[in-house]
Amino acid sequence: MPAAIDHQTGRITFASAPGSAPTALFQFDVPVRFDTDSLPVQANAWDLQIANNIDLVEVLE
């Protein structure tokens, strides 16, 4: 099933409809920094902490 990829938009266009639902895994390498100096976490156990939200800001070079 050939497909065309537009690298500017990330859009994939299939030549024909896929036989099943297509799935994909993506990894992005974008430089970021934390948006705050503190990170509140919830300690559920001595080795398990949960951060509900981690705000990141893209570093533009």
Image: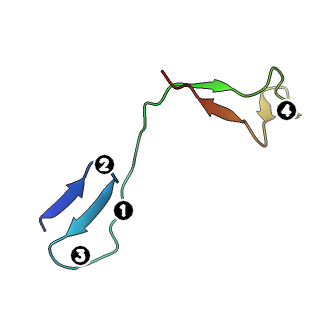
Which mark identifies residue 18? 3
Q: Amino acid at mark 1?
A: Thr
Structural distance between the alpha carbons of marks 3 and 2:
23 Å
Q: Earlier in the sequence, mark 2 or mark 4?
A: 2
> At which x and y percent is residue 1?
13, 68
Q: Is residue 45 above or below residue 12?
A: above
Q: Amino acid at mark 3?
A: Pro
Circle 4 sits on which residue?
Answer: 41
The residue at the point 23 percent across, 76 percent down is 18
Could you tell me if the residues under marks 2 and 4 are in contact, i.e. CB atoms within 8 Å? Answer: no
Say what secondary structure mark 4 lies in: loop
Q: Amino acid at mark 4?
A: Val
Q: Amino acid at mark 2?
A: Gln
Circle 1 sits on which residue?
Answer: 23
The residue at the point 73 percent across, 28 percent down is 35
Structural distance between the alpha carbons of marks 4 and 1:
32 Å
Structural distance between the alpha carbons of marks 1 and 2:
20 Å
Q: Earlier in the sequence, mark 3 or mark 4?
A: 3
> At which x and y percent is residue 19?
23, 79
Q: Earlier in the sequence, mark 3 or mark 2?
A: 2
Residue lying at the far left in this picture: please name it. 2
> At which x and y percent is residue 10?
33, 53
Say what secondary structure mark 1 lies in: loop
> At which x and y percent is residue 27?
41, 40
